Amino acid sequence: MVKQLNDKVFYIGSDDLALDLFESQYVVPEGISYNSYLIKDAKTAILDTSDARKADEWKASLEEALGGTEPDYLVVHHMEPDHSALAAWALQRYPGLVLVASAQAVKMLGQFFPGIALEGRTLTVKEGDVLELGSHSLRFIAAPMVHWPEVMVSFDESEGVLYSADGFGKFGALGKCGFYGRDDDDWACEARRYYFNIVGKYGAQVQQLLKKVSALPLKAIRPLHGPLLEDNLQEYVGLYDTWSRYEPETDGIFIAVASIHGGTMEAAQMLAQILRTKGAPKVVLSDLCRSDIAENVEDAFRYPKIVCAAASYDAGVFTPMYEFLHRLQIKGWQRRRAGLLENGSWAPSAGRVMKEMLGAMKEIEIVEPVVTIRSRMRREDFAAMDALADAILK
């Protein structure tokens, strides 16, 4: 897809609607975009390439936008293969092309493209370096661990545009969610799921980047996935600030349920009803066995309180709950209040394992009581569930 953004800047990215799993783990029912840009000035710069899945389309778009001219630079903001897969092809296709990237990215080139000849073909840049293209100049800003260590973003000083790599990206093909953020009915929904599952562990590093960005005369953000952002920039930056500080975004309670034969789910649904009766602002219940784990991670970060309800299994906890809590742990989930509901027909063990896993996370307050039911909820369990509701709402 070629779209002229102004007299010197072109969008040359592509949509992928056939991909089933992004990074082989995240469902993308609305597809994904691989964004790439071209600046044609006194010097011409390609900003990132594409995933190999869209190689032919990207090459055709690049040639169309070049219009017979030769590019001078290929800027690689991020070495992940969905953005850099065609870097070696571009160096071979255009003999005068110089690849511009961080020192760590240049080192990675040989890992992804064994045998690639780079002598005299690279320009290593660091924080504060400027690539002069003519009326356009790109100032580089280091963004390590957002979300790989070699990442650089760049700021076009002439236009006030931040080329933000994976930052401010979202799931969804542009043909589905809109080319610009203003065309997107609910940017935050898939941007949130993207952030917490792709970048979320590195909140401290995102905060460092936001401090640098806040000092810029920012007029637009152009990420490597998802819509180009030109309006409501304070909203997008504000959400990133909230997310990267691990602050809850929405007041409410997330109930995550791993039920084998329905008894645990029945108890969790009763707890949800009790919470609503007691005035909980919002209660969201999810069946971990049948829902997208990435969306469950998103909701765990979104709300300040969680209840984990799970059956006991193999003297531990039912597998979907274990996988969910493990995912929260590796994504850096923290600073939340948690309640526990366990089910066990003869030797309840889920509560112990959930408490151990949550206890290994940062600043997680586990409230009492831990509610234990035996196979099926009974009337005598209501008092404990009522007490748990009071504790989680406190």
Image (tube, rainbow, N blue to C red):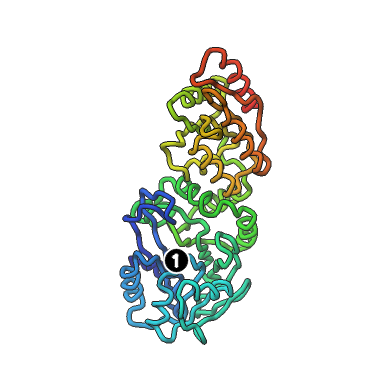
Residue at mark 1 = 81
Q: Is residue 110 above or below residue 360?
A: below
Q: Residue furthest top?
A: 379
Q: Residue 174's x, y, as percent? A: 37, 56
Toward the viewer: 390 or 311?
A: 311
Name the residue rendered at 40%, 78% in the picture. 90
Residue 276 in the image, given as x and y percentages of width and height:
53, 23
**Viewer can see residue 252:** no
Number of labels in the image equals 1
Tell me what residue is drawn at x 48 percent, y 47 percent: 193
Residue 34 placement (x, y as % from top left): 40, 62
> Which quarter of the rendering shows the C terminus?
top right
Label 1 sits on what residue type?
Pro
Q: Nearer the viewer, residue 304 or 5?
A: 304
Left or right for 26, reference 107? left
**Drawn side of residue 280 relative to residue 222, left or right:** right
- For residue 96, which quarter of the picture? bottom left
Q: Is 362 drawn above or below residue 316 in the view shown?
A: below
